[in-house]
Amino acid sequence: MSSAHANEHEHAHHFRDAEHQFQTNKQGMWLFLLQEVLFFAPLFVGYIIFKFIYFDSFHYASKQLDWVLGSVNTVILIVSSFTVARAISSAQRGNQTGVIENLVFTLICGLGFMAVKAIEYSHKIHDGLLPGPLFTNTAMLEVAPEAPLFFTFYFCMTGLHALHVVGGLVVFVWLIKRAKRGEFGPGYYTPLELTGLYWHFVDLVWIFLFPLLYLVG
Amino acid sequence: MSDDKNKHQHHILSNAASMWVFIFLLVFTVITVAIAQFDFGQLNFPIAMLIATVKAFAVVLFFMGMKYDSNDNRVIFATSFIFLFIFLGFTAMDLFSRGQIRVVGSPLMAVVSDKVFDKPWLPTEEIVAHGKEIYVKQACATCHGDEGLGNGPAGIALGARNFHEEAGWKNGRNPAQVFGTLSKGLNAMPAYSTISESDRWAVAHYVLTLGPRAPEVTEADLAKVGVDPNQQGAGENKQRTLPVNFAEKIYLKEI
């Protein structure tokens, strides 16, 4: 399939036509996203349950997060979702430069997100708020005895999410290379569509993580 | 999946539409951050989740194109959230109803001993041994664990006290204060006012032997729990029967 041309895409022999292949690939992506929801589900459920059990500790610990940085990252991801949507519609209209520009912009957004994450993580590590036995902030234990549990959830949830972002970035680099070769157009843009779905899902997870961890903790 | 009529008719999200969705998401981000600056108590959580859900719908319907997608794909994605809610719902139902089961159940186990101690606020070997017996009979271990580590099957979720720790006793940890907690309850800990006062004192002494040496009881401490050590018969039990109002409740339920 790598020899594909923008307007006359070949399809694998077990598909009726390129459209059949496109729809099947897309359905596969939705199935993947279904299990992604379930993959994140235990963390969300666990967090919500423990948030109400250890309400005061979680409230105190949540106030240690920087909601300004969290908001900046929320906006960054929304912008990148927007540019991914634009990259796809550019391909559908046959606008090659539009595809490349929007993909590059998305990549920059993703890097920006990780940069902000790095700043946040280094602050947390500096304050001794790492999960489990690595939690060394004894002063906080006096005020909020269950704070380590909050930060375990914090690192697991945002860390898993950040891994998804990194995975997306790798795919975007690959997509940019292919887009530069002019592989995407109205007749074939499956990788863009599927990566778009994935990237929007990553945004979706953050849409819930941000208020849960930073705002109402 | 593939429909020949729809061949090469993929929906193209117009620039105007994607711009509107983008602005919509930004506006709701500002709203949720702004609202978070005010404290609505219990409503904080549902409000934030409602706004997040509204944003999620915008992303799923337009950016992910669910609005223009096939029913198959809609069902697939919706299924994941149905399972998420089953998971959350049943876990929450289980965890947050455990305390209630204990509160209803414990008075029925009320009459467990006839033992009366003369000065039950003094930690003698005899009363500690009796306390251990009551601890077992009242199934304290359900929450507090066999060793009193607060790790019983129901205790982990409810945050049951670990008796081996010195810090964090909300009502203090001299025998009178523990007696008070046993009598009145504390958060998920039910009140055991239905077992006799001597039994309550005994349990208090027993659990205190598990941790570092407890402070001694002063007359002021005793006064706080309504005991005058100088009065005749101070150690005798004032009430050790099934409370009438509880019996009534059971009776009415059975009708």
Image: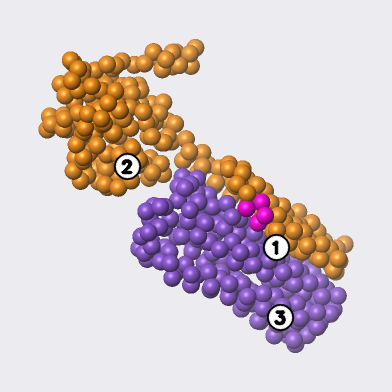
Label 3: chain letter: A
Which element carries disc 1, helix, strand or loop?
A: helix
* Residue B61 percent location from the top left of the image: 76, 57
The answer to whether dots 3 and 1 both sit on one chain is: yes
Q: Nearer the viewer, residue A199 or A136?
A: A136
Asked if residue A4 is positioned above or below residue A44 in the image, the reply reads below
Name the dominant secondary structure of the magenta segment: helix
Label 2, label 3: how far apart the Cα atoms are: 57 Å
Q: Which mark is residue B169?
A: 2
Quadrant of the image occupied by residue A38 = bottom right
Identify by letter the chain in purple: A
Characterize the local packing of mark 2: few (<14), some (14-19) or many (20 or more) Cα atoms within 10 angstroms.
some
Q: Colour of chain B?
A: orange
The tag earlier along the polypeptide, 3 or 1, is 1
Dot label at residue A104: 3
Question: Is residue A26 depicted above or below A108 in this figure?
Answer: above
Could you tell me which secondary element the residue under label 2 belongs to? loop
**Relative to the observer, which residue lies in front, A174 or A109?**
A109
Residue under pointer 1: A27
Whether residue A51 sits left or right of residue A116 in the image: it is: left
Asked if the magenta segment contains residue A23, the reply would be no
- Please state which amino acid type lies under the numbered disc 3: Val
Q: Which residues are magenta?
A: B33-37
Crowdedness of circle 1 by 10 Å Cα count: few (<14), some, many (20+)?
many
Amino acid marked by disc 1: Gln
Q: Position of residue A45 (x, y in %)?
A: 53, 50
Label 2 to label 1, Cα distance in Å?
56 Å
